[in-house]
């Protein structure tokens, strides 16, 4: 598509080549022709997030042929130095505030080229938060969640997403998976709010794994779901529940753990009756690792949990760790454990290693991998978003902006590949 802009220059009238509409997780290229070749040219990008905060980036080019090809040319100055159109978005910083970027439903991405202080031209591209034809339905059966259905009415592979202890379902990931052709159930299994229910408690204390199994079976029976298995994607605390559910049903055919643990931890919440497991199976507590009795928990944000989990893990005997490790070898499908090398919330890489050891020792007929993403922390998400200000939030997350830019893309590509393997 060619997008021709207005210009404040009488000598140059740049032409912008880029798509008119692009989905959030899709790469695109930007090429600008008829710009000066005898002076530095600055390309700026701008967008507003859901809170109305303006985010900007810039790149300065020494142009040789009157053309800026962002996928080809290396900037000589600016917020990034590599030839990559996505870097225009990923290296954006907010003009005001220190909060991370918040996705809006539809975002107008503005481009502007300037030379010698003069605006030469502008153009706009619409980025959509997934496919606008995705439908969303509130589900209140024996469980709570949102169902995201891809466009059309043909059967599609199913996925259940498992959020972490933020208490908020994986809306963003679920919508984007549905936009890529999956029928997705964003399961709600825990809340930090006062609006707790019998099915969605505000304590992670002996939650029945059968709650998740019922959701999986419901999705398998749904008219839009193709095949005899669905995938599962969990983040942070969520993979514990996803992996345990996958040991209890043949209906889960692949599990992706993002920043999660493959050992079960002690329960927690607003009202905890003492040391107990986070989960039960058939009414019996699942073996778990307890927190050390001498720990102090700093609840002022950003909360640092890493040291307390590490101290508790190191205090556990090898036998206790083995008992608390989820029997992942019983899962009927491929397994992908993704963690950030700089995860500052907890040592997800370390807490998944016992499961990898089990698979190595006992054998597994399916593919499995532990993927560690350098310079990434606990806040990996859907790609091609600004990555500034992710290191801290309610919790200390770790990582760097450049680390997240790479990790987001790797996570998304490998996750969708793993989920699609169910239908192959």
Image: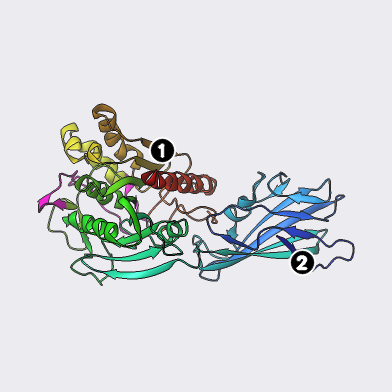
* Residue hosting label 1: 371
| SS type, badge 2 | loop
Residue at (41% x, 38% y) in the render: 371
Is residue 298 shown left or right of residue 381? Answer: left
- Where's the C terminus, which quadrant? top left
Determine the CA span between mark 2 and mark 1: 44 Å
Label 1 crowding class (10 Å Cα cut-off): few <14, some 14-19, many 20+?
some
**Residue that lies at the very extreme toward the front in this rendered image:** 154
**Residue that lies at the very extreme toward the left in this rendered image:** 283
Q: Is residue 139 magenta?
A: no
What is the quadrant of residue 96 in the picture?
A: bottom right
Residues at discs 2 and 1 in contact (Cβ within 8 Å): no
| SS type, badge 1 | strand
Compared with residue 167, is residue 64 higher up or lower down, i.e. above or below? above
Q: Give how far across and how far down residue 320 sits, in percent.
A: 16, 37
Counting residues from the N terminus, which is met first, the one under dot 2 or under dot 1? 2
- Where's the N terminus, which quadrant? bottom right
Q: Give the overall secondary structure of the magenta segment.
A: loop
Numbered circles on residues, count: 2
Q: Give how far across and how far down residue 372 sits, in percent.
A: 42, 38
Label 2 crowding class (10 Å Cα cut-off): few <14, some 14-19, many 20+?
some
* Residue hosting label 2: 5
What is the quadrant of residue 223 in the picture?
A: bottom left
> In the drawing, what numbered circle is on residue 421?
none
Residue 235 is at least partly visible in this image = no
Residue at (28% x, 56% y) in the render: 220
What is the quadrant of residue 72 in the picture?
A: top right
211 or 36: nearer the viewer: 211
Range of residues picked out in magenta: 280-306
Is residue 71 shown left or right of residue 34? Answer: left
């Amino acid at each position: 598509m060619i997008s021709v802009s207005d210009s404040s220059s009488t000598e140059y009238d740049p032409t912008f080549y880029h798509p008119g509409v692009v989905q959030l997780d899709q790469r695109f290229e930007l090429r600008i022709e008829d710009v000066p070749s005898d002076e530095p040219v600055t390309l700026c990008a701008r967008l507003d997030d859901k809170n109305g905060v303006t985010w900007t980036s810039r790149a300065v080019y020494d142009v040789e042929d009157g053309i800026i090809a962002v996928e080809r040319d290396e900037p000589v100055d600016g917020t990034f130095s590599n030839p990559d159109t996505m870097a225009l978005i990923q290296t954006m910083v907010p003009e005001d505030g220190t909060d991370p970027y918040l996705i809006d439903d539809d975002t107008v991405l503005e481009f502007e080229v300037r030379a010698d202080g003069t605006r030469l031209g502008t153009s706009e591209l619409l980025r959509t938060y997934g496919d606008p034809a995705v439908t969303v339905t509130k589900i209140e059966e024996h469980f709570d969640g949102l169902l995201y259905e891809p466009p059309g009415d043909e059967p599609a592979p199913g996925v259940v997403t498992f959020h972490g202890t933020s208490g908020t379902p994986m809306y963003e990931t679920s919508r984007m998976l549905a936009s890529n052709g999956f029928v997705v159930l964003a399961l709600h299994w825990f809340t930090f709010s006062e609006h707790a229910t019998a099915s969605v408690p505000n304590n992670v204390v002996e939650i029945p794994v059968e709650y998740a199994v019922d959701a999986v079976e419901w999705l398998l029976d749904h008219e839009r779901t193709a095949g005899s298995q669905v995938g599962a994607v969990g983040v942070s605390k969520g993979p514990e529940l996803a992996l345990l559910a996958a040991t209890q049903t043949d209906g889960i055919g692949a599990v992706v753990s993002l920043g999660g643990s493959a050992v079960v931890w002690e329960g927690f919440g607003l009202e905890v009756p003492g040391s107990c497991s986070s989960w039960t199976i058939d009414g019996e507590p699942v073996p778990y690792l307890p927190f050390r009795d001498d720990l102090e928990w700093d609840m002022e944000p950003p909360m640092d949990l890493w040291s307390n989990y590490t101290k508790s893990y190191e205090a556990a005997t090898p036998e206790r760790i083995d008992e608390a490790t989820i029997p992942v070898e019983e899962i009927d499908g491929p397994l992908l454990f993704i963690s950030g090398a700089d995860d500052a919330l907890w040592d997800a890489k370390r807490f998944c290693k016992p499961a990898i050891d089990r698979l190595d020792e006992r054998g597994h007929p399916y593919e499995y991998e532990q993927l560690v993403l350098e310079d990434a922390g606990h806040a990996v998400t859907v790609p091609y978003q600004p990555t500034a200000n992710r290191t801290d939030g309610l919790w200390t997350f770790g990582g760097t902006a450049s680390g997240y830019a790479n990790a987001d893309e790797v996570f998304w590509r490998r996750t969708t590949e793993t989920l699609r393997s169910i239908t192959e």
